Image (cartoon, rainbow, N blue to C red):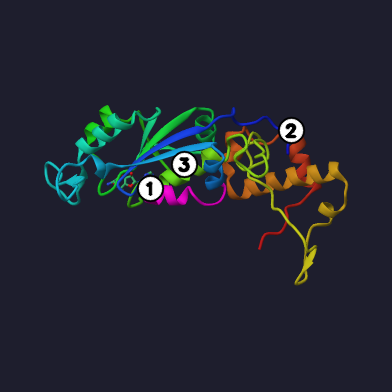
Amino acid sequence: MTDAPAASGGGALRIDVFSIFPQIVDDFCSASLLGKARSAGLLDLRCHDLRDHTHDVHRTVDDQPFGGGAGMVMRPEPIFDAVDAAEPPRPLFLLSPGGRRFDQALAHELAELDGFSLLCGRYEGVDHRVVRHVVDAELSIGDVVLSGGEVASCLVIEAVTRLRDGAMGNAVSPVTESFGADGLLEEPQYTRPAEFRDLTVPDVLRSGDHGRIERYRLAQRLHRTIRERPDLIEARGGLSDDEARLLEEFPADPYH
Ligand code: SAH
């Protein structure tokens, strides 16, 4: 346990997902910590099949785009009907490469809610009337294009649920975890054995001197962030004088 503040209150987080492949999300969220969170009543995940709201024999959810062009577009009616029927918790997000970028800060915001919902696109996307009249916002998991919103939804559900009270084996540290309160990446970590194929663990970590270990760890977080993500250093306003001294006291762990 850490004495860091908890990320959320108790109770179940309700997440409704709308998809033509609800099983992908349901299966992914049945394993490991997410599965445990569901059995423990911490996560109330409801996956809705958009095809249940079609009325033709082929259960058609897509059609050709007005104006022509490649690919198919998801029809509005099954989506409007599925959302009306489920009355899902809001905000309802459409997963979309054009949406707001999902990040750890937004994961923390969503973990504070009682619930939210996710709509998964497929094909070339959804009829724009859905964007204007059904969803509250669009959410992107990064500048990549997937074939559907299901994997993106799983990513959002996992990142948010692990921040809820009791959903992790060990409490998440909101400060030292990557993208935590100090704005740095996490430091390299080691476990036993201390020596393995001539590869050794840094002496300081085995010294038992906890003050020195904490200073060493902060120095490694700084080194790593400067090297891998200089944009994060800039975003937190550079380095303090103390931090600059720490970098001299402890050189970067070799990375190879
Ligand atoms: N034609 C669209 C891409 C459609 S990809 C375009 O050019 O923007 C099909 C579906 O996959 C999308 O509707 C969305 O739900 C999902 N998807 C693809 N990439 C995604 C991303 N980076 N973030 C979130 N969802 C994504």
Q: Name the residue located 64 percent from the left edge and 41 percent from the top edge.
A: 184
Cα separation between marks 3 and 1:
10 Å
Is 174 included in the stretch rendered in magenta?
Answer: no
Residue bearing mark 2: 3
Q: Quadrant of the N terminus?
A: top right
Magenta stretch, residue numbers: 23-33
Answer with mark 3 or mark 2, whichever residue precedes in sequence.
Answer: 2
Q: Quadrant of the C terminus?
A: bottom right
Q: How would you rate the neighbour count of disc 3 (Cα within 10 Å): few for under 14, some for 14-19, many for 20 or more?
A: many
Residue bearing mark 3: 156
Mark number displayed over residue 18: none
The secondary element bearing badge 3 is classed as helix
Give, as a three-letter code, the residue at label 1.
Glu
Cα separation between marks 3 and 2:
26 Å
User: What is the chief secondary structure element of the magenta stretch?
Assistant: helix
- From where the camera sits, is residue 151 visible? no
Q: Name the residue located 37 percent from the left edge and 34 percent from the top edge.
A: 93
Answer with mark 3 or mark 1, whichever residue precedes in sequence.
Answer: 1
Give, as a three-letter code, the residue at label 2.
Asp
On the rendered structure, is 41 left or right of 218? left
